[in-house]
Amino acid sequence: MTMTTRVGTEGLGIAVGREEEADPGGDAVTPTRDPVDGDPRDAGRPRAERRRPRLLVEITLLSIAYALYATVRDRQGEDARPAAFGRALVNAGRVVGLEQRLGWYHELDLQRWLLADHLLIKVLDVVYATAHITVTAAVLVWLFVRQPGRYRPARTALLLGTGAALVAFWAFPTAPPRLLVSSGFTDTLARVGGLWSFRTPAIEHIVDPFAAMPSLHLAWATWCTLALLPSCSRRWTKGVVLAYPVLVGVIVVATGNHYFLDVVAGSAVALAAWWAAGWLGRAARPARKEMALAVVTSGASQDHLGDLAVDPRLPVRGMAGSTRFSRSSRS
């Protein structure tokens, strides 16, 4: 009979001599379908991209990224020179001026309206101080454990978005509304309270006071929505996921930490980073496929499979598809 072995070139997940089921009615051979790791909607991705990354590698990568983030943030936060503060105030004035021309300058109205309920403001202060890190970290861990096929591009998008925001903080330092005391804004963490205040010594040395534009809170909140939305099958879960960045936007404005323009810019950064991560993933696939084919052909030669010949009945579709080989044997 004629036995046809299919060697897939989708990513690095390539297996030679994959288990097959013979068709008793003829010479055709049907390969068994491999299980899909993660979400079935990721079946279009190469198999290697659907496998869970190595935990140690991910921990190392994220630790390095956070160390760089903390270094830039701390250096900016420790810059208390009058010139730095003056530059941040000038940029804040530019943001306010643009909002006034657009008709968006209503941050003070929102804050004054919510300040009537101190308990509500205190809750918002607590959410502002905790959700930014905990929710983002929880989504990242959930993707790693439950949706490995979507973890890699999501992780890349998070790193790209955070890096872009850090560049913006350095290039365009902007004082948040809470520092514009003469305009009537209130620092709710200092006046009403929460888990901590920007005047707490430990916090004062690590927080960048001029990181208003764009809002990293909104960038990460939008990232969480983009990461979770494909897995939401019910309307109420979709509603909760879509409402999360809206809630964060209200919180960061009500607590005097961002302008509405910061909120829009933060979401735009997340969307751009998500697109860029997807583009990078697609651009890297041909190189991975070429390397995978080289590994397979090298392994086939070492295993004395040099008598494999291309089956003339089947087209060779190159790297974009899969390559089929055949070997005739008599039973």
Image (cartoon, helix red, strand yellow):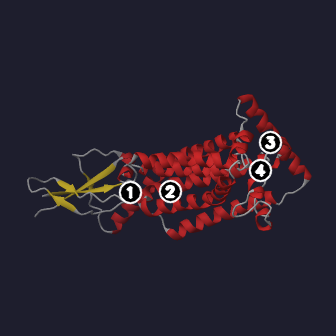
Residue nearer the viewer, 81 or 47: 81
Quadrant of image for the C terminus? bottom left
Q: Which residue is mark 2?
A: 152
Q: Residues within 10 Å of mark 4 (few under 14, many from 20)?
A: some
SS for callout 4: helix
Count of labels in the image? 4
Does residue 185 appear to the left or right of 297 in the view shown?
A: right
Q: Which residue is mark 3?
A: 92
Mark identifier at residue 47? 1
**Which amino acid type is marked by label 1?**
Arg
- Locate residue 160 relative to residue 323 in the image: left or right: right
Single out the mark in the foreground, 3 or 1: 3
Q: Pick whichever of labels 3 and 1 is earlier in the sequence.
A: 1
- The amino acid type of the residue labelled 2 equals Arg
- The residue nearer to you, when weighing 120 against 12, is 120
Q: Which residue is mark 4?
A: 170
The residue under the point 43% across, 47% down is: 236
- State whether residue 302 is above or below residue 92: below
